[in-house]
Every structure is written in C-alpha cells, then in structure tokens.
Amino acid sequence: MQQPRSFRSPLVNTSEPNLDLFPEREEAEWRVLRMQKKLHRWAVDDPGRRFDDLANLVYDPAFLVVAWHRVRGNKGARTAGVDGVTPRGVGGAATDLLAGVREDLKAGGFVPLPVREKTIPKASGKVRSLGIPTTRDRVVQAALKLVLEPIFEADFKPCSYGFRPRRRAQDAIAEIHYLASPTRNYEWVFEADIKACFDEIDHTALMGRVRRRVGDKRVLGWVKAFLRAGVLTEDGRDRETITGTPQGGILSPLLANIALSVLDEHFATKWESLGPEWTRAKYRRAGGAVMKLVRYADDFVVLIHGQRADAEALWEEVGAVLAPMGLRLSIEKTRVCHIDEGFDFLGWRIQRRTWRSRTGKTAIYTYPSKKSLASVMVKVRSLTRRAKHRTLADLLRRLNPTLRGWCNYFRHGVSSRTFGYLDHYAFWRIVGWLRKRHVGLNMHTLVRRYLPGWQIRAGGIEMFRPTGVAIERYRYRGTKIPTPWASAETTGSPAPAA
C-alpha cells in the first residue's frame, strides 16, 4: 500500500525579507479597495482590454495583508491542509508567513501543494468531496481573487447571483417571483442541474476564458498551477486533477463563475437579438418564445414565456452550450415543469397557487421546501439528543444559531406556518430533553423549575423562537445591483421582461 506523503514545510522563507513592508489592516483595506476600483473601471470602460501587469498586485503587501485577514476570518480557518497548519494556529508568525509567500511569488518559486480531500455527506445520501488547500495556498488564492474579481465582475451578467459580491440567493428568488408574476407570466420552467460541475470543468476551456481578460503570464501560471495541484485523498493516495476546480478553495467559486458565464452570455445574446421592448412584445404576441436565465453558481433555471415544446428544446440547446466547457446536464435531476406544478430552487418551493382571500386570482408563492424543513428538523433532533449536552444552557448555545440562521434565510417568503411548525417541534424536543435529563421529576415540577411561564431559558440564554421572526417580502433589486467598486451607488430598476 502506498504510504501517505508528508507535506510539512517551514512557514518562514530562508531569506530575510523586510517585515516593515506590510501595512496595518485598515490602511491595507483602503489601498486594496482603491486599486480594485481602478481595475473595475478600466474593465468596464474597455470590454476588450487584457490586463498584462497583475502579478505585482498579487504579491503587493497590502493585497497579501487583506488576503490573510480574509483567510483567517473564514469559517474554515480551523481546518488544516496537507501541511497540518491552520490559519488560526499561525498566530504571531503571520507576518513571517506573508513575507515568505511574497518572496516566493516574486522569485517565481511558488508551487501550490495538493489539496487535502474531505468528504461530507449530502442530503441525497451521496458524498461531496471538498479540497482543503494549505494556509500558504489559501493566502495566494485570496490575493488572486482580490485582483481578478473586479475585472471579471465587469463582464458577468446580471442573471448570475451565486458567489458574487452584494448578491445573494434571495435576489435570485425575487427575480423568479418577478418574472412569473403578472404581467410577465413566464409559466414554463426548465429546472436544470449540472452533473459534477466542480469536478468536470475543462481546464483548457476555462483558461481560454481567463485569458480573454488576463495577459499576465505569471498570473495565468498561478491559476493553472492551482487547477493542476492534485488531491491527497482521505486514504493517503495522490490523485491528479486533470479536470475541475476543487470545491473548498477560495478561488474555485470565481473560476466556476467564469466557466459558467458561457450560459449567461448565451441567453443574454438571445434576449438582445429580440431587439427593444416593443419588438419583444410584438414577438410574444405572435406566439414566439421568450426566455430568461436565473443562475446561482451551478444551480440554474430558465423561465420561458411560450409552450412546453420550447422548454423541452432547451435540453439540446443548453447541452450544446455546456459541452465546450466539459460539462453536461444531469438527466436524473433536470426536468421541465409548469409554474402551477411548482419546483424547488435554492431551498425554496416556488409555485403559482390560488391567492388566499382573492377569489379567482392566482399569485406566486415562495416558501421553504419540504426538503429544507426536513433538513433543519434533522439538525434539531440531533442537537437535542439526551447525551449531547451537559446543561440546558449548552444546548441553547448550539441550537439557537441553527434556528436563527434557518429562519433568517426563509423570512422573506410565505413562511409563517412553517415557522410555527418548527417552533412547536423544537420546543417539545427541548422539553423531551429535560424530561430525560431529570427522570425523577413529574411534568408539573419540571415546568415549575425549568419552564417558568412556559419560557425556555437558562444561564442568561433564552430559546430562539421561530414564531417571533417577522415575515418581510424581499424587494426585487432589478438588474443594476451595484458592485463594491462602483464609484457611485446606483438604484436598481426592474429587469425588462417583455
């Protein structure tokens, strides 16, 4: 059996760099933002421009300082790569780490190490494979993202919402709600799923799209090196990465968006070919099909104002668009449905139903899907097992963030009844936990001691109640959501949907 390789390496470069180069965090953030605004403005003003001198920004001290703080503040900062070093564990050696990374990048000696594979279970019963880079590699990836993101954001289309600054899943749901509502009435839905998207992206095709904007050979070399770094599997074997961009890397979502922007551009071109609003309206009245794409990372739907046959034709059309990137549709998960039938997207159930209290009228309802509700209930059940926590306060410290995060995500939909159901379930699971922890007490004594006024609290912590979450309709922000690098904030306007 092949022995696991050791990737232990010193944090400090053997040379003695000038450690005074690195600014304080506040100054570094300001310098980086100023440069990002320039990059974004240049990219917007000249759509055909290729940026030839970006490497000096990647190893600029200010960019490395900001990159380091992004890495250290990330949720995965307690997780180590193949070198066994966690960002949280670096401590006072951070400046030495950054100095070593900078010297390696300047000298052309930087080589990323393989990512450490970590598999996590999926709701479907399968597993998702994550690739965890080393701390040094994460810093370089974060610096690359700081440089490249403002450039490519100038090209990304407004129909894309995943892993983009100032955009979120609620924006995608709000656009679907807007398009499916009167008077737009996009009724047919092509609900698509890309098979193993992050694992099958073709490197040559991806790098070709990166080269459209980046001419700096060193930056292109670093991006390609990360793509080809390889994987150290959980059983200690080395695996080459011929295709794909491992999930878990800081740079991976940006690279995936660059690859999947072929879809955005395809449907944007189809939309623009219909001409101005009055010609689109005339085309629709004549029975022509009009389509709008809404994409969140590798999850997307195409809404169609037309016939079912128009939606079915997208199987071949979308497949042909994805094929040059090495991607394909999942036959099992891709389907065509009507808005009255409803579909699940990003954890939501979206369906046109009879409008309550409005006789004869219909409306688009967005509410938590059964799968999402089942998922949070599984978490509540797991957290309220008898042997999980020593005290009620410990239980509430773990349970409250789960309930609060789930409710905050779904508070912009028709979720009141679902919140009531979850509230009831979580409350009585805690009561059941108390009864199992205090077997000798009858219910009356248990309520008097631990549930005064039927309120659950302990150690100054009160149970988060889903029923107390206010339901607010999320405002559709249209197509002009400002980037962090826009010189002036602009107000979004509804997307044309004729």
Image (cartoon, grey):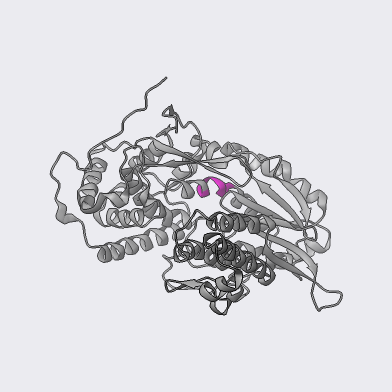
Residue 59, image x, y percentages: 27, 49
Residue 271, image x, y percentages: 67, 57
Residue at the image position 50 percent from the left and 66 percent from the top: 400
* As drawn, 357 above or below 403: below
303 left or right of 435 in image: right
Residue 292 occupies quadrant:
bottom right
Residue 37 occupies quadrant:
bottom left
Q: Is residue 471 visible?
A: yes
Residue 264, image x, y percentages: 60, 52
Q: Is residue 270 visible?
A: no
Residue at the image position 59 percent from the left and 51 percent from the top: 265
Q: Which residues are magenta?
A: 257-262
Please name whichever residue, 488 or 80, is drawn nearer the observer in this view of the structure: 80
The answer to if 18 sits in the magenta stretch is no
Q: How many marks?
A: 0
Residue at the image position 65 percent from the left and 46 percent from the top: 193
Which quadrant: the N terminus? top left
Please name whichever residue, 413 or 338, is drawn nearer the observer in this view of the structure: 413
Residue 323, image x, y percentages: 62, 37
Which quadrant: the C terminus? bottom right
496 left or right of 310 in image: left
Residue at the image position 35 percent from the left and 36 percent from the top: 113
383 left or right of 278 in image: left
Please name whichever residue, 463 or 91, is drawn nearer the observer in this view of the structure: 463
**What secondary structure is the stretch in magenta mostly built from?**
helix
* As drawn, 285 above or below 256: below
Please name whichever residue, 114 or 273, is drawn nearer the observer in this view of the structure: 114
Residue at far front of view:
440
Residue at far right of view:
360
